[in-house]
Amino acid sequence: MKQTRYDWVYVLGPACPQTGKTAGLISPYLNTDVVNIFFDQLAKEIDDDVHVVMIWDQAGFHTSTKLNVPDNVTLIELPP
C-alpha cells in the first residue's frame, strides 16, 4: 500500500533585489482570502514612496476579481 496523504505549506514572499527587504506570509492553504491577508500585511510594510511589482502565475486566486491589490503594487501575470 502506498501513502497518498500529504501536508502542504504555502509561502507568499516578495523580495527586493536592490535592498534585500522581504515580507512574507506562511499558510497551510491558499485562496483569495489568504492572498488578501497577505496584501493587507504587505501594504503595512511597504514605505509610502515604494512601488512593488510582483510576477504572478495565473492561478484562480491570483486572478480573482475579489483581490484587494494595494495601489502601490502592480501584478504582472506569467503567460499560460
Image (spheres, rainbow, N blue to C red):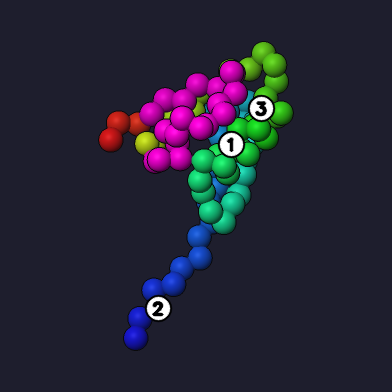
N-terminal-most mark, 1 or 3: 1
* Real-space CA distance between mark 1 and mark 2, rounded to the nearest whole angstrom: 33 Å
Query: Quick one: which residue is furthest to the top in this view?
Result: 49
* Real-space CA distance between mark 1 and mark 3, rounded to the nearest whole angstrom: 10 Å
Q: Position of residue 2 (x, y in %)?
A: 35, 81
Q: Amino acid at mark 3?
A: Ala
| Number of residues whose C-alpha sits closer than 10 Å to that of mark 3, classed few (under 14), some (14–19) or many (20 or more) | some
Q: Is residue 47 above or below residue 23?
A: above
Asked if one can make out residue 72 in the rendered structure from this viewpoint, the answer is: yes
Q: Secondary structure at mark 1?
A: helix
Please tell me the numbered disc located at residue 3.
2
Q: Position of residue 44 (x, y in %)?
A: 71, 28
Which residue is labeled 3 in the image? 43
Q: Amino acid at mark 1?
A: Asn
Q: Is residue 39 above or below residue 50?
A: below
Q: Secondary structure at mark 3?
A: helix
Which picture quadrant has residue 61?
Answer: top left
Q: Amino acid at mark 2?
A: Gln
Which picture quadrant has residue 34?
Answer: top right
Q: Which of 15/59 is in front? A: 59
